[in-house]
Image (spheres, helix red, strand yellow):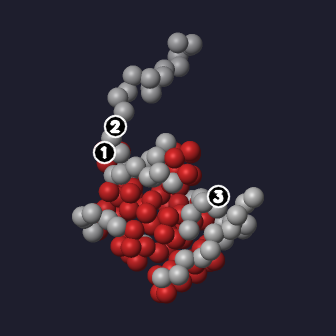
Amino acid sequence: MKGNRVNLYRDRPRKSAPARLPVSVKRIEASAPGPWTADIALRRYPRLIAHMICESPGYFMPQGAAVALADALNGHENWCEYIFSCHNRNPIPVVLRAIHGRWQHQGYMAHYPMALAIVARQVLTGEEPLPASWF
């Protein structure tokens, strides 16, 4: 230990995902308790799904973001490539970043009105956009 620095994370036991749910996610969970599905999450929270699409660096489409939200609310791991690589299968940080960073979703690959239009099309018609390849 150097000086007065203390490592707060070294000896702390790791908590399970449902115990670590922040207040904003707990509020969503309390509004409709029970098992969440992607369809319920997509129809109930289309704006949050659109913000999750904006927050992901091009990985989410409406159905994938809805599955990640449902997994976060159910306390399950998510095996999406983005969540697996960046957040160790824990979808909760993705949901929180979408909530807390919603005021910054503008510009290239983060244009909120376009993401919301894509989600609205998915909800109304059931059609998801075709994925584009980066390669």
Q: Nearer the viewer, residue 109 or 82?
A: 82
Q: Nearer the viewer, residue 38 or 17?
A: 38
* Above or below for 27 versus 116: above
- The alpha-carbon separation of the residues under discs 1 and 2 comes to 6 Å
CB of mark 2 within 8 Å of CB of mark 3?
no
The residue at the point 64 percent across, 58 percent down is 57
Say which of marks 2 and 3 sits in front: 3
Q: Secondary structure at mark 3?
A: loop
- The alpha-carbon separation of the residues under discs 1 and 3 comes to 28 Å
Where residue 46 sits: x, y (%)?
47, 75
Q: Secondary structure at mark 1?
A: helix
- Residue bearing the label numbered 1: 19
Q: Is residue 53 visible?
A: yes
Q: Is residue 128 left or right of residue 71?
A: right
Q: Nearer the viewer, residue 5 or 107?
A: 107
- Residue bearing the label numbered 2: 15
Which is nearer the N-term, disc 1 or disc 3?
1
Kind of residue indicated by mark 3: Pro
Q: Residues within 10 Å of mark 3 (few under 14, many from 20)?
A: few
- Residue bearing the label numbered 3: 57
CB of mark 1 within 8 Å of CB of mark 2?
yes
- The alpha-carbon separation of the residues under discs 2 and 3 comes to 28 Å
Kind of residue indicated by mark 1: Ala
Q: Is residue 54 left or right of residue 91?
A: right
* Above or below for 58 versus 62: above
Kind of residue indicated by mark 2: Lys
Where residue 40 sits: x, y (%)?
35, 73
The residue at the point 56 percent across, 13 percent down is 3
Q: Is residue 58 left or right of residue 31?
A: right
Q: Is residue 48 visible?
A: no
